[in-house]
Amino acid sequence: MQLVLDIIVWLLLGLGSFFSITAAVGVLRFPDFYTRLHPAGKNDTLGVLLFCTGMLVDCLRYDYSYLIAGRLVLMILFMLMASPIACHAITQAAYLDGLKPWQKGDPRR
């Protein structure tokens, strides 16, 4: 049973690393502000959620305090709510400020 839990933890941490790295690559490679916010809002949120879930499984496996597990659950819930809302608010503020989306063939990056 310990081996199965080890594999689950490593899988969750590996997937979290993958989504965090793809978020960083997306922020560097996409052409404008709006397309860069997409990986920052989606992939980064998923990466942090997978990290926290992996830590939660590891925490419950080693019988740590329920306070630590509760904090991890609160972190997961906060990230599920706060990150997409913040990304949307930043995007809306940029649009209302007059920042135009990038068009294909536009030379500016």
Image (spheres, helix red, strand yellow):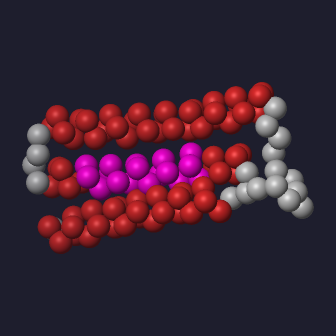
User: Which residue of the protein is positioned furthest toward the front in this rendering?
Assistant: 108
Res. 104 in view: no
Question: Between 64 and 100, which is closer to the camera in this rendering?
Answer: 100
Q: Is residue 54 magenta?
A: yes
Residue drawn at x 70%, y 46% is 33
Asked where in the image residue 101 lies, by quadrant, the reply is top right
All told, the count of numbered labels is 0
Residue drawn at x 57%, y 32% is 85
Asked where in the image residue 91 lies, by quadrant, the reply is top right
The relative height of residue 65 versus residue 18 in the rendered view (above or below) is above
Q: Chief secondary structure of the magenta span?
A: helix
The relative height of residue 49 versus residue 15 in the rendered view (above or below) is above
Question: Between 29 and 88, which is closer to the camera in this rendering?
Answer: 29
User: Which residue of the protein is positioned furthest toward the right in this rendering?
Assistant: 105
> Left or right: where does residue 35 sit relative to residue 81?
right
Q: Which residues are magenta?
A: 39-56
Split into 4 quadrants, where in the image is the C terminus?
bottom right
Q: Position of residue 37 (x, y in %)?
A: 63, 46
The relative height of residue 12 versus residue 74 in the rendered view (above or below) is below
Q: Position of residue 51 (x, y in %)?
A: 35, 54
Q: Position of residue 40 (x, y in %)?
A: 56, 49
> Left or right: where does residue 62 sit relative to residue 24?
left
Split into 4 quadrants, where in the image is the N terminus?
bottom left
Residue drawn at x 47%, y 39% is 80
Asked where in the image residue 26 lies, by quadrant, the reply is bottom right
Q: Position of residue 54 (x, y in %)?
A: 30, 56
Q: Is residue 70 magenta?
A: no
